[in-house]
Image: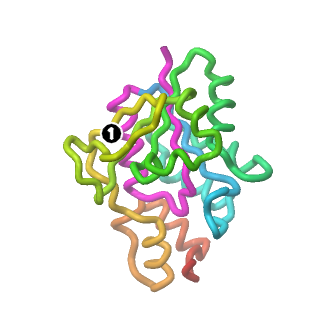
Amino acid sequence: MLRVGVYGGAFDPPHNTHVDLVRAAMSQWRLDRMHVLPTGQPWHRPTQPTAAVHRLAMAELAFEGIPGVVVDARETERSGPSYTVDSLRELQIGYPRARLHLLIGSDQARALTSWHEWQEIVKLATLCVAARVDDAAPQGQVPDLALPGATIDFLHTHPVATSATDIRQRVAAGQGIAHLVPPAVAGYIDQHHLYRTAR
């Protein structure tokens, strides 16, 4: 059976931890393909992300060279709020014999019951949960994670530490980010004068 990963987010900007998580997920679950989906109009964020054209371009730069990764623009092209369940349904139609694996952080997993049609999400995809640095649980597992009907697996990798918000603030403050993002992404941010004003 084809194994297809799905990894959504603002990617504003994409950083090294994003890249590391994708590499680890593809290796651990032997994924044939990974769809990286920069979000369109996020329903749960009070502020709008950077223009989609920039986030898509940075994602292409961040994930280029990783076999099987596809930067998927479908959510940025969709009108109205961007819902994960809609993308999963579309991908299931595109891959009718595949098992979908949704890669999310443990903070997102804990909040999943607030997502639009979350019960359908757990039917459509295996939840592949990446621990964060504030998770205190053995083997990278997440405490207090109860999602009825969900198939959950945990990513065996170092906890997530990098924050896109911190990166934007560092750029606005004139601080270096070369150790936090792929070189091509750092160059793109500088070339297009992104994040000069903190949000």
Give the answer, above or below, for where 147 lies relative to 96. Answer: below
Q: How many dots with numbers?
A: 1
Q: Position of residue 195 (x, y in %)?
A: 56, 76
Closer to the camera in the image, 72 or 48: 48
Q: Which residue is mark 1?
A: 155
Can residue 68 be seen here? The reply is no
Query: Where in the figure is residue 172, as x and y percent of width and height?
Result: 50, 82
Question: Does residue 187 appear in the picture of this structure?
Answer: yes
Q: Secondary structure at mark 1?
A: loop
Badge 1: few (under 14), some or many (20 or more) residues near its Cα, within 10 Å?
many
Looking at the image, which residue is at 26% across and 44% down? 140
Q: How is the image coloured?
A: rainbow
Residue 87 relative to residue 21: left or right: right
Q: Which residues are magenta?
A: 1-30
Q: Quadrant of residue 47?
A: bottom right
Of 121 and 173, nearer the camera is 121
Relative to 66, say whether 190 is above or below: below
Q: Please tell me whether residue 44 belongs to the stretch shown in magenta.
A: no
Residue 19 against residue 85 in the figure, above or below: below
Q: In the shown orientation, is residue 87 left or right of residue 162?
A: right
Q: Amino acid at mark 1?
A: Leu
Rendered image quadrant of residue 151: top left
The residue at the point 32 percent across, 31 percent down is: 28
Residue depicted at x 75% and y 48%? 77
